Image (cartoon, rainbow, N blue to C red):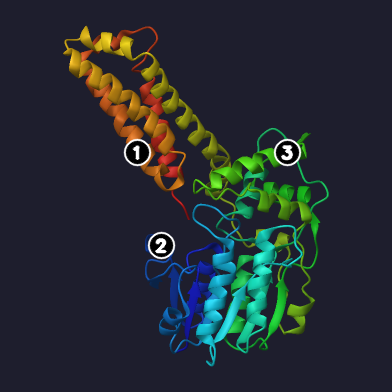
């Protein structure tokens, strides 16, 4: 039995490659930096935990000994708190090339259509430099460059398109000049299997794409029809300055660990168009990739799809609302700490305990409002908000039950805020 090692094994493309290779009879080993995420994606697979961006050639050589095929499906869209493009797209490739030097292992690189060292984004430039390291080596390699990948799972650009297609009431008219080609995730995985089996000549460089392109608007409308929503009856132009402003905000959030598909790289890539040429893949003997209409026909659109698309739009609003609510609660508590102490003193608290409780509550609220903005802590911050809200309710019920009858409803309002925190915690599960 041949062995295939898949880097980035729990990503959109990597997980599909794992499943397809296993179904074809390969023994597969996944590699990535988060074991918990990998086990959610494929609980029965073999997985090796490594930070691909930091693994050196000697470690790769040991890990990949007696491996027949290596599939590199790892990557990042933009520099951020969790990602470095030069590290994952260049350094990691360089170490991998050194480790595989002198072996008969086939390296299958999943790149991206349109990569070039003269491209407008560092994503494409760094991808091109990484591809260049492979092409300049003496390895047995195949480089596959898919266009916009569409599959049952939504992530990154395809999640953004699904969300755009689910906008209620009106079509957000954006990127009118953009042209898009797509490729079915299953076709990408099938191409990897074909290359792994040796059916694709060594040193093949090919785009994986449907043959025809369509406008961004037509792509979004096709997805909306597939989702089962009624066609839009009106459209609203979205000015590019607003889009760029939102992208800059998403870039800033990237340094807090949020991998938003609205970041500058994604917007610039869509604006430039996502285009490829299937000629090289056909010349290599590869099967044609199906058009978007056939891709969508192969994917069932269920209630889960519609829920995801709408909730994907709402999740940033949920996070922002919770952050503002708790930050304002903390700031108001600090500004009015004397009034808070007075309330507690009238309920029998000692002066020292009243001061400590008032200050501690304000600081806690402020800390939780800030913590939810940092992606690695966001889900735990939501659960802490829920716990804090319930603790406030319990304490108030014991020491100030009259507040339940307050006409402004300070305690009643904690209930929907706590429920929002619980819902947001559920939405923040990744992959």
Residue at 71% across, 79% down:
205
Badge 1 crowding class, 10 Å Cα cut-off, few under 14, some 14 to 19, many 20 or more, is: some
Residue 383 numbered mark, or none: 1
Mark 2 or 1, which is nearer the eye? 2
Mark 3 or 1, which is nearer the eye? 1
For marks 3 and 2, the one nearer the N-term is 2
The residue that label 3 is drawn on is 172
Badge 2 crowding class, 10 Å Cα cut-off, few under 14, some 14 to 19, many 20 or more, is: some
* Residue 68 versus residue 187 in the image, above or below: below
Circle 2: element type: loop
Residue at 54% across, 93% down:
102
Q: Position of residue 287 (x, y in %)?
A: 70, 78
Residue 142 sits in which quadrant? bottom right
Mark 3–mark 2 distance (CA, rounded to whole Å): 36 Å
Left/right placement of residue 27 relative to residue 300 reads left
Badge 3 crowding class, 10 Å Cα cut-off, few under 14, some 14 to 19, many 20 or more, is: some
């Amino acid at each position: 039995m041949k062995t295939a090692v898949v880097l980035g094994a729990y990503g959109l493309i990597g997980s599909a490659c794992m499943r397809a290779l296993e179904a074809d009879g390969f023994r597969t080993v996944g590699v990535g930096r988060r074991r918990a995420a990998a086990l959610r994606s494929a609980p029965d697979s073999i997985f090796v935990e490594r930070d691909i961006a930091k693994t050196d050639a000697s470690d790769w050589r040991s890990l990949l000994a007696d491996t027949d095929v290596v599939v590199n499906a790892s990557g990042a869209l933009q520099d951020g708190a969790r990602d470095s493009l030069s590290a994952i797209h260049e350094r990691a490739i360089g170490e991998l090339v050194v480790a595989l030097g002198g072996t008969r292992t086939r390296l299958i690189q999943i790149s991206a259509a349109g990569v070039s060292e003269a491209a407008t984004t560092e994503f494409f430039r760094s991808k091109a430099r990484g591809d260049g390291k492979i092409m300049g080596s003496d390895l047995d390699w195949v480089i596959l460059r898919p266009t916009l990948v569409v599959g049952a799972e939504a992530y990154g650009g395809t999640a953004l398109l699904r969300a755009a297609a689910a906008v209620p009431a009106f079509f957000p008219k954006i990127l009118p000049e953009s042209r898009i080609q797509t490729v079915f995730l299953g076709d990408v995985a099938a191409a990897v299997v074909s290359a792994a089996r040796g059916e694709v000549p060594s040193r093949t460089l090919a785009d994986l794409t449907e043959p025809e392109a369509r406008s961004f608007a037509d792509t979004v409308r096709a997805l909306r029809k597939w989702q089962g929503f009624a066609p839009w009856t009106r459209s609203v132009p979205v000015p590019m300055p607003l889009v760029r402003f939102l992208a800059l905000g998403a870039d800033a959030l990237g340094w807090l660990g949020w991998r938003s598909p609205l970041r500058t790289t994604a917007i610039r890539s869509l604006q430039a168009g996502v285009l490829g040429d299937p000629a090289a893949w056909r010349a290599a003997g590869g099967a044609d990739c199906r058009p978007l209409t056939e891709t969508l026909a192969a994917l069932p659109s269920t209630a889960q799809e519609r829920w995801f698309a709408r909730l994907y739009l709402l999740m940033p609003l949920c996070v922002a609302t919770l952050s503002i609510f708790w930050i304002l609660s903390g700031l108001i508590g600090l500004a009015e700490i004397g009034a808070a102490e007075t309330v507690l003193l009238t309920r029998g608290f000692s002066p020292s305990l009243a001061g400590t409780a008032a200050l501690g509550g304000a600081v806690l609220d402020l800390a939780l409002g800030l913590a939810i903005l940092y992606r690695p802590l966001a889900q735990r911050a939501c659960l802490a908000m829920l716990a804090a809200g319930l603790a406030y309710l319990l304490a108030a019920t014991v020491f100030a039950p009259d507040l339940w009858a307050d006409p402004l409803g300070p305690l009643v309002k904690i209930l929907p805020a706590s429920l929002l925190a619980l819902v947001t915690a559920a939405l923040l599960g990744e992959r």
